[in-house]
Amino acid sequence: MHNQGIGSWPARRARKTPHRIALIHEDRSLSYGELHDRVHRLASVLRDRGVRRGDRVAFLGPNHPAFLETLFAAGVLGAVFVPLNTRLTVPELRYQLDDCGAALLVAVRAPLAGELAAELGGRPAVLDAEGEGYEALLAAAEPLGWDERVGPDDLCLIMYTSGTTGRPKGAMLTHGNMTWNTLNVVVDVDLTAEEVTLVSAPLFHIAALGMTCLPTLLKGGTAVLESAFDARRALELIARYRVTCLFGVPAMYEMLAAEPGWADADVSSLSNLMCGGAPVPTRTIRRYLERGLSFMQGYGMTEAAPGVLLLDRRDSEEHAGTAGVPHFFTDVRLVRPEDGGPAAVGEPGEVLVAGPNVSVGYWQLPAETEAAFRDGEWFRSGDVATGDEGGYIRLVDRVKDMIISGGENIYPAEVEDALLEHPEIADCAVIGVSDELWGEVGRAVVVLQAGCSAAAEKDPMSLLSHLDGRLARYKIPKSVVVVDALPRTATGKLLKEPLRREFGH
């Protein structure tokens, strides 16, 4: 077998455990043997539609078997998979498709797919990967009978992450990056071949894909795919399928524990609860401990595929509040932001990450790629942390001006740019404020144009309607404050710290 990439995983798993259940989706099961067959049939379909080695194949849709079938089929052909966020608007999606030069867009249950296809004018072509038409297409296809030579250094996927300049950047992850991250999880988390993982966080984010779904499939366990998270249904599925593993952001776990049936729900099968995207609130930890459950908290980023730090549940009480220690095959340094020297124990330092799971850079952005690495090897996270004598790392701040809301990254520059297109806004800044459910949400601090309308002065929230359809809903600020002027340096640089002190509560 020449293919050493993740596109070969269904075939490798099928030759070991063909009859075991790989996927469950809406009560439909797929064995590893069936998954392997479908992947190679889809690879034939993609090849017949002109997809070749190195071509980009985009996917737009919720968690669905076709997501994984497309990922693996692209890997069989040596093509590059590009998952798209279903929460984005048509202009945002169009930018990413144009930027990556997608040869084909595979879509499932995407309300925007028709509108997007019309705007794209047939380039790239859209393949509907659900329903009788898709099934007939696979049934008529001959399974691809050969393997493209794919190695660990070949590009596996491009996952877009918002940039501080307001334009999304495509983080390039190789087959080696994805494989080594999976090995990190298998080493550091007690996954078994009997694992049953509920995947309700979106697979178009790297955390659900890299931290639970792919490791489960590598081990030969079962992934239960849910199109969206629903707390009541999640409790039902945990009991029905004896789910052992979950991943979610804190808001998802809070909604689960707030569900009326939580106290009496059968959660006895759960053993691996992974949480990322933001620190887990103490009250949430307490509610789960009352049910005999503890979290493995983690810290990561798209560029690390995503695992960087993990706090084992056995350490969760003694080292509460820390993000843990580096994953097995990953290394972390803390350096002083001002001069790049090593940070002493307890001294804040920027988190630098190196390892075989770390991205090779950003798609078609050589300058940004060079700037993202120190000494060409250590990825600069932009996050600030402290380390203790035992090597446990605690995140304390962010160098980059990023807001994390319910596990979604929001970069204020993108939102500010859109707000400034409003004719009644003269200047603006977006900061993060605490939110009980989502951890953080955006707050817009705006300066109105002279002579603006009475409506804008009386109801500043009305200014946000300008963002509808331009930005994903989670990016739109949840509150607006009007000020006379924004604090700036003599050179015009915006000073956000005074704004955070005055309006960040």
Image (cartoon, helix red, strand yellow):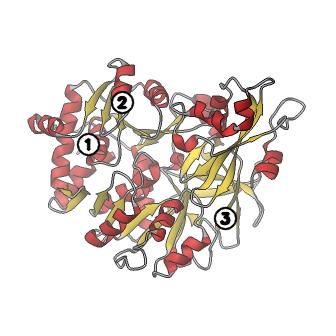
- Indicate the position of residue 499 as horizontal and vertical percent values: 80, 45
Gap between marks 1 and 2 measured at Cα: 16 Å
- Rendered image: mark on residue 262: none
Q: Quadrant of the N terminus?
A: top left
Helix, strand or loop for disc 1: loop
Camera-near label (1 vs 2) is 2
Up the image or down, 375 lies above or below 383; here it is above
Check disc 1 and report the residue beneath it. Answer: 2
Q: Amino acid at mark 1?
A: His
Helix, strand or loop for disc 2: loop
- Who's the residue at 19% across and 32% down the image? 45
Up the image or down, 242 lies above or below 424; here it is below
Helix, strand or loop for disc 3: strand
- Who's the residue at 81% across and 24% down the image? 450
Check disc 2 and report the residue beneath it. Answer: 54
Q: Amino acid at mark 3?
A: Arg
Question: Looking at the image, do the residues carrying marks 1 and 2 touch, with CB atoms under 8 Å apart?
Answer: no
Q: Amino acid at mark 2?
A: Gly
Check disc 3 and report the residue beneath it. Answer: 394
340 vs 7, left or right, is right
Give residue 423's quadrant in the image.
top right
Q: Earlier in the sequence, mark 1 or mark 3?
A: 1
Q: Residues within 10 Å of mark 3 (few under 14, many from 20)?
A: many
- Who's the residue at 46% across and 77% down the image? 293
Give residue 438's quadrant in the image.
bottom right
Q: How many marks?
A: 3
- Indicate the position of residue 66 as horizontal and vertical percent values: 27, 44
- Who's the residue at 34% across and 63% down the image? 233
